[in-house]
Amino acid sequence: MLQMLKKVPSEAWPGIVLLLSATVSMFLANSAWAPMQSGLLKSVGTVSFHDITISMTLTEWVKNLLMAVFFFYVGLELKRELLEGALSSASTALMPLIAAIGGVLCPALIYLFMTNGTGFEHGWAIPAATDIAFALGVVALLGSRVPPAMKIFLLAVAVVDDLIAILVIAFFYSDSLHMGWLGGVALFYLPMLLLMRQRKNWHGMYMLLAMPMWVCMQMSGINPTIAGVLAALAIPMRNERGESLLIELEHKLRPYVHYGVMPAFALASAGAAVGSGFAAAIQHPVSLGAGLGLVLGKPIGITLGTILAGLLLRAKLPGSIPSIVGIGFVAGIGFTMSLFIGKLAFEGAKVELAVKMGVYGGSLLAALIGLAILAYVHRTPVSAGTDEADIFTGGGDAGRIH
């Protein structure tokens, strides 16, 4: 058993831990401990400072505060990729950008088609998101058989996907705005931008400014997780000596996010009592829209977007068409982000089980189909000489659209 665990790729462990956390949450929700779990998650915690009072349930604290840390980490990753990574130049960024747009639009259209006229159209963004940890973990199970260019392509598409999801949350899933509190956000954010401009690696100062900025964002009506993204974008990439606070923070946060924040979110949000409502839930328009959006919309949208990008840019694709289809299916693992958007879209509505069944079913099917396709297409390990620098321009087993 120990030898088997040692053979599991390190990139796969975050997804495994997340899956175990979701399984535990589902088990508790359908066991004798369900009332205890429900009571704990609904327990209210209140923080007061002068005239400011924030009162939320434990589930809401996880969703609004811990997930702000998750989005801070995602923001760091996004900024690194934009400045020094796979999205740092137009020639390498356009293909995954177009592919990601296709991977957002197609699932959203499928969802809207399945929910048309039902009153549940507001959840259109549920199947539009990709869970990076899960997706990369699934591909990591195949080890060196998947070419580096395809892994980087998946990461780039997922990062752009997260950026789109962040914008969607900010513009479509936020409450009515309170301009005074938005002024408070600006009051604390501007000094962070000045520190970034001066390229100061002052960990403590950024955190001292980020915390009250989160409070103002929470009170403003905009989803407070956006504060995490803004804070990340204000972290300087490098200082005068070439040292990077951003990369240092990203590396330090990675284990806490992968093995702390995301499992905590799964424990707090993934559980759902199945019971007699299971059959109705899986046939609900929201469940069908979310599930089909993930398992069909993602691979169709990403594949067509990649082919379109290849034609428009006259560029080689990062891999063969079957390989891109496999990556498209893997990108259909929505899980964390899909559940998060589902909570925002239908807060208080009685469709929680339908959302979760759609996300679970769609993500699981997408993962299994994607893994099977990639395992079949890439039956032998890639040679060590594959050049990752040729991403989206023909490295490894890249193909060209004629």
Image (cartoon, rainbow, N blue to C red):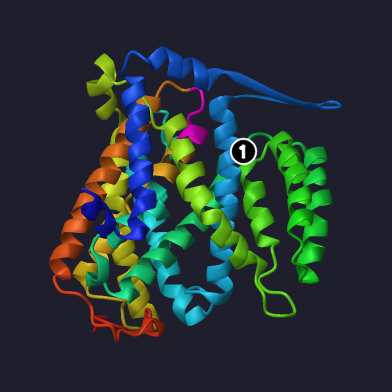
Q: Secondary structure at mark 1?
A: helix
Residue 330 among those drawn in magenta: no
Q: Which residue is mark 1?
A: 65
Residue 345 among those drawn in magenta: yes
In the image, residue 246 above or below residue 182: below
384 horizontally vs 92: left or right: left
Q: Quadrant of residue 33?
A: top left
Residue at 68% of width from left, 55% of height from top?
A: 231
Q: Which residues are magenta?
A: 342-348
Q: Is residue 184 visible?
A: yes
Q: Quadrant of residue 140?
A: bottom left
Kind of residue at badge 1: Leu
In the image, residue 219 above or below residue 153: above
Q: Is residue 171 visible?
A: no
Give x and y (percent) for residue 44: 61, 19
User: Considering depth in this image, is 375 or 18 the residue closer to the camera?
Assistant: 18
